[in-house]
Image: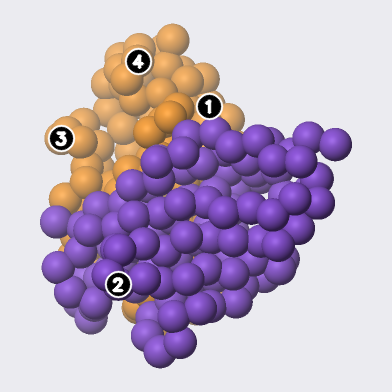
């Protein structure tokens, strides 16, 4: 597609429920990144994909968080047993050539609210 | 470990005035530096990037930034701001080959007054 697409744009869920967030990167972009943006916290790195594999998942905050990428394209971030501290905007970005250093293209994010 | 500090949480500038947003980084080798802008309800957009060479880099929307190794700084500047520049600005640092992750600062919110 023309840009990075994320869905849903907003998600309200009850504490303890599982949620899935989707990212559709720019066609042909081999690298995909997930970040979390909390109020006043800046962007927190979660995980990086190169193709379908994840060389760096050091930012996943707990084992409740997981992510996968299929076909070198769409990625899903899953949060199990959501907690209120998971409330944030989850941003996805992609880049070409497997090198994020040329600058990411970000999606508009999914705003997750856990009540 | 790499890190970025943006010391100013919020800056207010009059329309037409000059702007400088501060960014200090910590990185053990030659850094790759970026500035991103986030308008309300929008994703982040790349303004400019520095890899090597000329320490003054030009970006989109009339922005520029200067890399100063001795001060570990990469400050963003604009000679004359427009009301549409009101947004959140993020500085980021990335590493060399093999280190794909960008580390972002906490951002500076820019308010423009008439």
Task: From the image, state the color of chain B.
Answer: purple
Task: From the image, state the color of chain A.
Answer: orange
> Is there one chain holding both mark 1 and mark 2?
no
Residue at the spot 47% in from the left edge and 60% down from the top edge: B75
Q: Earlier in the sequence, mark 1 or mark 3?
A: 1
Q: Chain of mark 3?
A: A
Task: Mark 3 vs mark 4: give the one in front.
Answer: 4
- A59 or B28, which lies in front? B28
| Left-right relation of B83 to A42 | right
> Is there one chain holding both mark 2 and mark 4?
no
| Left-right relation of B106 to A108 | left
Q: Say what secondary structure mark 4 lies in.
A: helix
Q: Tell me the quadrant of the picture where the N terminus of chain B can be found.
A: bottom left
Q: Earlier in the sequence, mark 3 or mark 4?
A: 3
Q: Is residue A52 visible?
A: no
Q: Chain of mark 4?
A: A
Task: Mark 3 vs mark 2: give the one in front.
Answer: 2
- B102 or A63, which lies in front? B102
The Cα–Cα distance between marks 1 and 4, rounded to whole angstroms, is 13 Å
Q: Chain of mark 1?
A: A
The location of residue A60, given as percent across then percent down, is 22, 42
Q: Which mark is residue B69?
A: 2
> Is there one chain holding both mark 3 and mark 2?
no
Residue at the spot 64% in from the left edge and 53% down from the top edge: B19
Task: Mark 2 vs mark 4: give the one in front.
Answer: 2
The location of residue A111, given as percent across then percent down, is 52, 31
Task: Mark 1 vs mark 4: give the one in front.
Answer: 4
Label 1: which residue? A11
Q: Say what secondary structure mark 3 lies in.
A: loop
Label 4: which residue? A84
The Cα–Cα distance between marks 1 and 3, rounded to whole angstroms, is 21 Å
The location of residue B104, given as percent across then percent down, is 37, 51
């Amino acid at each position: 597609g023309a840009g990075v697409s994320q869905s849903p744009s907003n998600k309200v869920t009850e504490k303890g429920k599982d949620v899935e967030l989707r990212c559709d990167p720019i066609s042909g972009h081999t690298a995909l990144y997930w970040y979390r943006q909390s109020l006043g916290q800046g962007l927190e790195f979660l995980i990086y994909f190169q193709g379908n594999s994840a060389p760096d998942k050091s930012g996943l905050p707990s084992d409740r968080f997981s992510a996968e990428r299929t076909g070198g394209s769409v990625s899903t971030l899953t949060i199990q047993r959501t907690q209120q501290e998971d409330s944030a905007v989850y941003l996805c970005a992609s880049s070409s050539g497997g090198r994020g250093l040329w600058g990411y293209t970000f999606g508009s994010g999914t705003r997750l609210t856990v009540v | 470990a790499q890190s970025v500090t943006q010391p100013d949480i919020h800056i207010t500038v009059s329309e037409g005035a000059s702007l400088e947003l501060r960014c200090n980084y910590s990185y053990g080798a030659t850094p790759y530096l970026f500035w991103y802008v986030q308008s309300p309800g929008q994703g982040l957009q790349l303004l400019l990037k520095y890899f090597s060479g000329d320490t003054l880099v030009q970006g989109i929307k009339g922005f520029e930034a200067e890399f100063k190794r001795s001060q570990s700084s990469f400050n963003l500047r604009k000679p004359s701001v427009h009301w549409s520049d009101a947004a959140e600005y993020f500085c980021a640092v990335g590493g060399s080959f093999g280190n794909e992750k960008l580390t972002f600062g906490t951002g500076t919110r820019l308010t423009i007054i008439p």
